[in-house]
Image (tube, grey):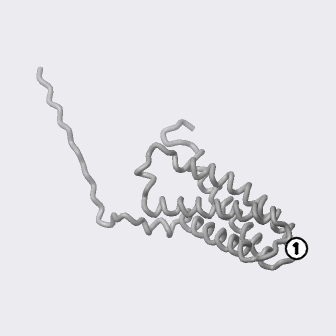
Amino acid sequence: MSHTVITTTTTTVRSGDSVLNTGYLGTIPGMLKIGQTLSLLIAFLCVYCVHGWPSWHAFCFFEVVALWFLLAFLIFLLMHLFRLQGKMPCINWPLTEFFHYSVGCVLLFIASIIASVKSGGVSALVAGSVFGFIATFLMAVNLWTSYSMACGPQAGASV
């Protein structure tokens, strides 16, 4: 008896493919990342532009936390915009973002509380802490929405 093996390869080409994924900016995670990035930028600039902080250590901590997560969210946003996750499949990106949001939510909440308590009535410092709380809220929403992707039931898993 002879057997015949037929192998078929299918290639799909979409007409709208480009390097830049601008459609991501219209999604909920994209808008949340833009909101987080902008609120952290405003919070950082509010604190950075004030001279003579009432509590130097508190606002240095706030600046470091705000700047760190501003850069991290900017990197995540650029990775989604340029579709770089597909080029690095060895990293579980939904889980990486989930843990980053978890740590960021806690640290930024603590930094915002400290900044609001130590602001001494300086309006720019109060505004910086308010934008820190806004960024914390946006991170919590993003954490909640990304939980199902990172830790929810996996496809094919029995429920």
Answer with left or right where residue 63 lies relative to residue 145. Answer: right
Residue 124: which quarter of the image?
bottom right
**SS at badge 1:** loop
Q: Could you tell me which residue is drawn at 24 percent across and 48 percent down?
A: 10
22 relative to 139 in the view: left or right: left
Vertical side of 8 occupied by 141: above or below: below
Between residues 107 and 92, which one lies in front from this camera angle? 107
Residue at the left extreme of this rendering: 2
Q: Quadrant of residue 118?
A: bottom right
Q: Position of residue 39 (x, y in %)?
A: 66, 71
| Image quadrant in which the C terminus is located | top right
Q: Which x, y percent locates residue 90?
A: 46, 43
The image shows residue 93 at horizontal and vertical percentages of 52, 49
Describe residue 131's horizontal placement relative to residue 58 as left or right.
Answer: left
Q: Nearer the viewer, residue 79 or 95?
A: 79
* Residue appearing at x 33%, y 66% in the figure: 16
Quadrant of the frame with the N terminus: top left
Residue 142, given in percent of the width and then of the height, sits at 62, 59
Which residue is found at the position 55% from the left and 64% from the top? 74
* Residue at (59% x, 45% y) in the render: 152
Q: Disc 1 designates what residue? A: 120
